[in-house]
Image (cartoon, helix red, strand yellow):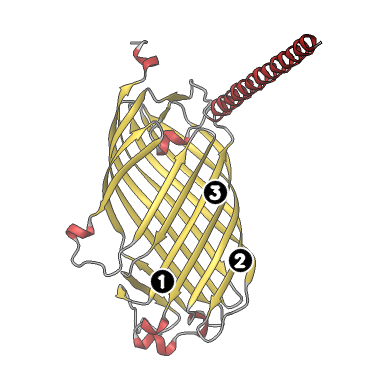
């Protein structure tokens, strides 16, 4: 009896072990299938994003690139009061010039740049700028991420409505007490991605062989903070300045949807010119501190604009070109108007190397 009972226990335990092993095998099998399915879906999405018509766009034949680049950052701010006799101030810093060397892998470029004003400027800035910008371009989707914190080298470029007959033109007058911080991101979708190539115009990772254009749509979000001490303006201006322009701080968030058109013009062999304009409907939520009181939060719709332009020569091995990316924002209240723009002008030259295995085999 004891022997029969022990044998029964052995059969039951063996059965449970076999069932557990089967469940474990099924679990690993399911996990493997799930991993393979996810990999397949990622590859499918990647293929769709990078799909091109090779009769219009020639893919990059190399793995790596080296590039020298001169980047020039520019920004300006226009403040205007809304009244019977409107007053206007135009403020901007001197353009900054940077020179850098970059190493690229496919569509990613990493490198280092130095501000040339540190070496050739007449004077050092007491409050240095902080600037960061990253643009990603693929055939179907792309985007920009940026952060800018301006230094203290702002100048009052012009005035309007404050003095008569240019009594005080105030051209290139240094001003203190003005600072700006902007951060944001912008993403877009290219509809005709098979025949039109943004990377051909801005990241040298493909070549446009025939002219083509496309509608584009996108979304962007940005945060703006502008601090202004109007008492730091020249005394004759402070005495006549409108109350609408005597704000202490403006902070606003900008949400926008854009729709526009972009076109690549192949005007000669290996030469390409691009223009891209995308107006945007923007929703702004803001708060203004006038010094003695904080004005109520403002929520309203305005128009913004994202502009790109570029020209490039690229024979697949060597490339040289220039490009412009400009962001323009409008901000309005019942008695105040602000237009601020910032952009980057790039001039670059470089070469590709280490041809991909697929193209080496075709030689």
Determine whether 271 is above or below 164 in the image: above
Q: Nearer the viewer, mark 1 or mark 2?
A: 2
Q: Which residue is mark 3?
A: 278
Position of residue 256 relative to residue 19, above or below, is below
- Give the labeled residue for mark 2: 285
| Dot 1 or dot 3, earlier in sequence | 1
Q: Tell me whether the residue at label 1 lies in contact with that at label 2, contact meaning CB atoms closer than 8 angstroms.
A: no
**Mark 1, residue position:** 90
**Corner quadrant of residue 284:** bottom right
Considering depth in this image, is 315 or 4 the residue closer to the camera? 4
Q: Earlier in the sequence, mark 2 or mark 3?
A: 3
Quarter of image, res 32? top right
**Image quarter of the N terminus:** top right
Residue drawn at x 36%, y 82% as measured from the top left:
232
Q: Residue at x 79, y 13 (%)?
A: 5
- Residue 21 lies left or right of residue 147; in this view the side is right
Looking at the image, tell me whether mark 1 or mark 2 is earlier in sequence order. Answer: 1
Q: Is residue 253 above or below residue 40?
A: below
Residue at the (41%, 29%) spot, across then down: 206
Which structural element holds mark 3? strand
């Amino acid at each position: 009896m004891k022997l029969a009972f022990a044998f029964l226990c052995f059969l039951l335990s063996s059965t449970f072990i076999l069932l557990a092993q089967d469940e474990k095998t099924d679990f690993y099998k399911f996990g493997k299938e799930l991993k393979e399915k996810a990999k397949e879906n990622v590859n499918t999405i990647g293929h769709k994003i990078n799909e091109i018509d090779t009769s219009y766009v020639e893919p990059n034949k190399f793995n790596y690139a080296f590039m020298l680049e001169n980047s020039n950052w520019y920004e300006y701010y226009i403040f205007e009061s809304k009244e019977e006799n409107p007053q206007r101030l135009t403020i901007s810093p001197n353009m900054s010039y940077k020179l850098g060397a970059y190493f690229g892998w496919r569509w990613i470029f990493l490198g280092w740049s130095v501000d040339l004003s540190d070496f050739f400027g007449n004077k050092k800035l007491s409050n240095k700028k902080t600037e960061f910008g990253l643009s990603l371009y693929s055939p179907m989707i792309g985007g920009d991420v940026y952060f800018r914190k301006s230094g203290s080298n702002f100048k009052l470029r012009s005035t309007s409505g404050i003095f008569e007959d240019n009594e005080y033109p105030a051209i290139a007058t240094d001003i203190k007490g003005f600072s700006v911080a902007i951060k944001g991101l912008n993403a877009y979708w290219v509809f005709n991605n098979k025949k039109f190539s943004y990377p051909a115009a801005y990241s040298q990772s493909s070549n446009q062989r025939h002219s083509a254009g496309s509608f584009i749509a996108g979304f962007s979000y940005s945060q703006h903070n502008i601090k202004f001490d109007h008492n730091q303006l020249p005394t004759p201006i402070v005495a006549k300045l409108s109350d609408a322009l005597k704000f202490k701080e403006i902070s606003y968030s900008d949400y926008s949807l854009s729709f526009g058109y972009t076109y690549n013009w192949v005007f000669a062999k290996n030469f390409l010119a691009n223009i891209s304009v995308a107006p945007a409907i923007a929703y702004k939520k803001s708060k203004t501190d006038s010094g003695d009181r904080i004005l109520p939060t403002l929520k309203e719709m305005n128009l913004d604009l994202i502009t790109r332009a570029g020209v490039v020569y690229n024979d697949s091995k060597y490339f040289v070109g220039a490009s412009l990316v400009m962001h323009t924002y409008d901000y309005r209240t019942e008695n105040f108007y602000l237009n601020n723009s910032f952009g980057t002008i790039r001039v670059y030259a470089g070469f590709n190397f280490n041809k991909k295995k697929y193209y080496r085999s075709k030689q």
